[in-house]
Image (spheres, helix red, strand yellow):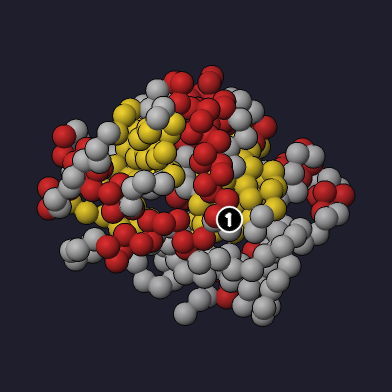
Amino acid sequence: MEDKKNHNFWDRQCIIDYNNINNIIKNDYIDKDIVEKVIKLPITPLPKNMKWEMIDLKENFNEIYNFYNYNYSPILTKDLFIWELLKAYEDKNFNLFIKDKINNELLGGIFGIPMTIRIYGKKINTYYVFYLCVHPELRNLNSASILINEIIRKIGISGKTITSLYIAMKKLPNTININPIKFFKFEINSIKGKYIKNVEIMKDVDYEECMKKINKFNKKFKLNIKFRDLKDFKEVFNNKVVKCFVIKKNNEITDFISVYEMGNKSKKNKEIKLYYYFNNTIKMIDIFNHFVEFGKDNNYDLISFNDIMDYKSLTKEINMDLDIAKLDDDNGLFYYLYNWECPKLENNEIAILPGS
């Protein structure tokens, strides 16, 4: 049963409470004039011994990484942390931190990175807000709410957008997905995989074609990411973390598959997770089986996916007992849109994944 007192902060935000509204058909801003209201707001106040600071990742990476390494779960590898925050390197205005005034110690942080999404066919520029982290000693002082309040204010006064996207492992009445997005994880050596024939490692000359085709493919999902340009696309897929492959016919790319290495500082239980794709000649089970073999040949222990996009179909296709993450009906991943109202979504209607 949900604890209503934990929702007080979100109940005051510009987010629809789906528990109180039936048959939503609108797909638009909740408040188109919200910027005029936000720019009048003062900087979110902090206790007198704390201060706000926007930190440049390039100059202060070790300080930030060490703070998250000690206070964030799960523990992240440096490669994964850098990958997910690549866009945050470009603009420190949305790298928001709370520090102790006396010793300059980091006490909390949150990031916002630009993202273009499409929802029920409408394209909107937004900010993906994530990596909310607060020092354990401050978690009973509403520090998380303070960080969210301030980044909402900063995004609003920037004039770049009046919406933002949040993904969290906490269910509130405002989530836009009907069911929690679950995690499925398997021991690679317990599964018989099979490589897809004629698969090639994606090369530099393939990026532009893949970007265009993923953007087109993603339109079939009601909430999806749109990669804005080649630079945006390469930041996501051309790095140490993501492995990308293509299938070609007559020099044209027909299929694209990808996987990324989950961050785990321990050398035990190395894990890969299924990522973005488009498929015209292969099935979802083929993608899964291909990366099972890839995982075995590259010394990975686990393979995982979320029941999102067409990956949801794998939960029925994989002929074995599912080692589903032990989550109850109120846990999993939940998606929230600030200042946007739309009908709720099934998991297989969503195509936005971490690291985007």
Residue at position x 57%, y 30% in the image:
232
Q: Position of residue 11 (x, y in %)?
A: 67, 68
Quick check: can you spot residue 49? no
Q: Against 234, is 48 above or below? A: below
Residue at position x 19%, y 33% in the image:
298
The residue closer to the viewer here, 247 or 75, is 247
Quarter of the figure with residue 121: bottom right
Quick check: can you spot residue 19? yes
The residue closer to the viewer here, 178 or 122, is 122
Q: Position of residue 55 (x, y in %)?
A: 59, 28
- Disc 1 on helix, strand or loop? strand
Left-right relation of 57 to 152 = left
Left-right relation of 238 to 177 = left
Q: Position of residue 99 (x, y in %)?
A: 58, 36
Q: Amino acid at mark 1?
A: Leu
Left-right relation of 340 to 168 = right
Residue at position x 57%, y 75% in the image:
4
Mark 1 lies on residue? 223
